[in-house]
Structure formats: C-alpha cells, structure tokens
Image (cartoon, helix red, strand yellow):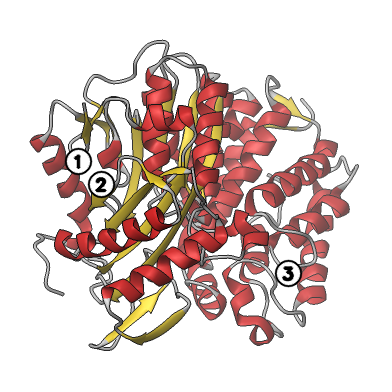
Amino acid sequence: MKKILNDPAVYVDEMLDGMIAAHPDVYAQPIPRVITRAGGATPGKVGIVTGGGSGHLPVFTGYVGKGLLDAAAIGDVFASPSAEQMADSMRQAHGGTGILRLYGNYGGDVMNFDMAGETVELEDDITSTTVLLADDVVSAPPEEAEKRRGVAGMVYAFKIAGAKAEEMADLDAVTEIAQRTADACRSIGMALTPCTVPQAGKPTFDLGPDEMEMGMGIHGEPGIWRDTLKPADAITDEMMDRLLADRPLGSGDRCSILVNSLGATPPEELFIMYRRAKARLEADGVSIVMPLVGRYATSMEMTGATVTLVKLDGEMERLLKAPCHCAFWTVV
Amino acid sequence: MTGFSSAHLKSAAAKLAAASEAAADELNTQDGKLGDGDLGITVSKGWREVANTDLPADLGKAFLEASKAFQRVSSSSFGTLIATALMSAAKATKGNESAEWNMVGGLLAGAREAMMARGKGELGQKSVLDMIDALAGATDGIDDPKALLAAVDKAIDETLDAFRDKPNLLGRARMFGEKSVGLDDPGMLAVRRMFDGLKEPI
C-alpha cells in the first residue's frame, strides 16, 4: 500500500481534522465523526443530514454547507457510521422543523439511519423523513429499481433539496423535491484500476493492466462486463445508451449531466467524455443545464468515471442554479 | 412487585455479556463460515456496553438506553437488529417502571415485527427472525419466570434443529446457498449461547 498516511486506524479522523482546519468558515465537528455547518443548525429551517462511509469526498461530509446539507455522519472508509453517530447528526442539524435523511441505498446505512430516526423521535421528539438515492442503473433491473445502489446522483439531490430547505420550505416540501430529484437521476460507472482501503491494505479488486470494467460500483461491486480498454467515445456511448434506455430523454427535455471522476481520472479525460456526451444529447434535442465535470463523488484513488443524468423540471432547474457554498462547490 | 424492571434488565445484560464473551470465539468461527466472522465480537461488546450503562428506573427508558448502548459499539447488521428489538421493547413499555412476566411473549412478537421491517427479512429464511418468532410463540401468556426460561430453552433447541438442514436465504449467508445446509445459522446460534447465561431466573 502506497498512501500518504500516519496510521490506518486514524486515517478518517486525521482527514476530518485537516478538512475542518482548512475550512473553519464552512465546517465544524461538534461530536467525533459528526460534521456540521460552522454555525450549527439554522433555527426554523428543515435540516438535511446524510451519512455513509469515508473515502468518497466530496461525498458525504464535503457537501455540508449553505444551500446544501446541514450535517453528515461519517464512518470508516467504505463502512457505515453507527446509528448513534447518525442520531447525533440529526440532533445537531435540527432547527426545530424536522429533518430529512438523504443518502445512498446501502443496507447497513439504511438500517442504522432508520434506527437513528426512531431514536431521535422517541428521545428528542424530532420528526424525520427519508429519501434514498438509488440511481446506479446496472445494480438492479428497472423492475427492482428500489434495490439499486446510490452513487453520484446524490450530488444533485443534495443541491436541489438543499436549496429548497434554504428557502425555508417545510419538511414535506423538502422531502418531495428530494424524492423527485432522486427519481429523476440515473447513473452508471466504469473503472480502470481499483483503490485500496487503508485498513485493508490491499486493492478492492483485481483488473488486468489493459482491462476496464463497465458498470462497476463505487466500492468495487461487480459490473456488467470486463474487457480490453475501449476508446473514450465508445465508453461514453455505451454509458449514455444504458442511461437513456433506462430513462429516455427527448426533444425539448432539459437535463443536467455530471461527468465525475472516481478519484484518479484527470479532468482532461472527463472533458473528452463530456464532449461526446454533450453531442449525443444535443443530437436528440435535449438541452443541457449547468453541466458538472470533475471530482464530485469519488472512490479513493480509483481510476474511472461515472456519468449521471438528471431530467429537470422548472423548479428543479431553478433550485439547481440557486446559490450554495461548501469547500468543494460554490454556486453564486 | 411482580414482573420485571430496569434492575432485571441490567442483571440480565451482565449475564448475557458474560455468556456471549465465553462463546465469542465459537460464534466468530461459525459466523466466518457464512459471513464476516465478527458475530462473537458484536454480541459480547454490545451486551457488555449495556451492562456497563446506567439504566433509568422507567422500563421504557431503560430499554431505550440499552438499545443506544448496543448501537454505540456495534454498527453491524446483527448489532442493529438487537438494538432494534430493544427499541421495540422501549416503545411498548414506555412510562412503566415494571412489566408483567406475561408480557414477554408480546414484547418478543413486537421485536420480531420491528426486526423484520428493519432487516427486510421474512420468516422461513433461516435467520434470527425465525428464532425470535419461535420464542414469541413459546412464551406467549406465560407469567412465571422459571416456566418462561424453560419454554425459551426448549424452543431454542427445537428451532435450531428445525432449520439446521435448510439453506440460508437471508443476508450475506444466502450467498452460500446449499453450502449452508447442515450448519446452524450463526444468528440463531448466538441466541442459544446468549441464553446459556440465563439458566436461572434473573
């Protein structure tokens, strides 16, 4: 394992210390592994919390900030936080008008967040709702869409629901727009090289030097096929084909697209992919709104990319363009 | 006072912790055959944390503190299921300083429903849910602590025997399919070992 670290056991805690030290105007850590906005909860505003394993920055903790999230509970690399940490994140985010739990569809996270929701309801009288991101189209067929994993689509849900909450909308309205966004997102990934979880010390999967895997999940979950590396346009075409087969877009539709690095893939290669994806959408008469190209949801140092499409209605587009600020993403 | 109280829960937690610690290696090994091999650690750490926690006199609040203690040291699926069962009991006994022994069956039935909802599991899949279901049935309406323990002891063995030669159909163990035939479900076995610590009334 070749990583810049001191001790795998404190990898996450030292990372969080550094992130907060670098951005004290954005983040605070009032309780270990619970990241909040620097100023804490906003009275009267619906709180949005998320959570999951470390290793995906800016997901999850990075998106705590104005116009985005209020708090995040963070576990070890690729491991769920405890239900207690999730309950604490909800308490910290509570401004008196309820909490939306907004996170990816992974078994351990779901069980623990549900548990945390019951705990704060029983103990603190906090009302909460849940919206799960299940946007990875290759992780289950459409008829079992509720079993799909959540990946980069959550970035759009954080942004759009976060903007709605910032307008002081009530919990039902924030939950509804978050669910509408989650329902409108479709994502797919591909990988070229694995990453190494510090506490495991070895790569999460093996892939030959000239191979790629289409559809691989962000923790190395198996994809659809593994073969020799294809040209960028062929890769992008297949990803777009699969996304559009699952959620067709046509003439007059408006969408945003996120071409996301899984960590090691450079912006240069993402732009090569974006150029192809844009041409494809425009050929179909689809208008692109606020395209995102860069590192938005990573998997440590994995080489590879994900593409997310989100079909927008008027309200979602307005909220996507609303101001936000965190250390990793600012919209003015 | 008849029935059981927060003091009984604390006493039981200490006994469950000791029994779980004694069986930790065995449970880790059995779990390693069908899962990630941390079940012994999960139950021993969880019950020890409960035993070391101050439990309030209100029985509902005591169950809630016990649930939180278990969550605190274990974010694994099995740990969360036990915490879920304790949370279910907390809701059912909220505002009472004691509960009649004949409520045990109902509390177990409530725990079964909550655990099924949380774990997205069904009965008949060879999991701890089948064990809790059997215990709920065996204890229904019994109001004597000794008779309760005897009924639990018998139901545990009968359930292990009934499911041993079936395949696991839930959780990570389901990946092993037919290879799980002939093996005790680790979660069911954990219940056996935990209750080995409760041979006498608490």
B88 shown above or below A207: above
State the residue in front, B84 or A5.
Answer: A5
Residue A79 figure quarter: bottom left
SS assignment at label 3: loop
Q: Residue at x 87, y 52 (%)?
A: B137
Across and down, in percent, residue A304 comes to 28, 68
Q: What secondary structure is marked by label 2? A: loop
**C-alpha separation, residue under disc 2 versus residue under disc 3:** 40 Å
**Residue in view at x 69 percent, y 36 percent:** B89
Q: Which mark is residue A328?
A: 1
Q: Are marks 1 and 3 on the same chain?
A: no
Question: Pointer 3: residues within 10 angstroms few (<14), some, or many (20+)?
Answer: many
Q: Amino acid at mark 3?
A: Lys
* Residue B65 visible in rendering: no
- What residue sits right under mark 2 in the picture? A58
| Amino acid beneath label 1 | Phe
Q: Is residue A11 visible?
A: yes
Residue depicted at x 64% and y 54%: B119
Kindly indicate whether the residue at mark 2 contacts the one at mark 1 (C-beta within 8 angstroms).
yes
Question: Closer to the camera, A322 or A138?
Answer: A322
Q: Are marks 1 and 3 in contact (CB under 8 Å)?
A: no
- Which chain is home to disc 3? B
What type is the residue that disc 2 sits on? Pro
Residue for badge 3: B126
Q: Of helix, strand and loop, which one carries label 1?
A: loop
Above-or-below relation of A186 to A132 = below
* Mark with earlier residue (1, 2): 2
Q: Nearer the viewer, mark 1 or mark 3?
A: 1
- Comparing marks 2 and 3, which lies closer to the viewer? 2
* Residue at mark 1: chain: A
Q: Position of residue A204 (x, y in %)?
A: 32, 74
Q: CA distance from mark 1 to mark 2?
A: 7 Å
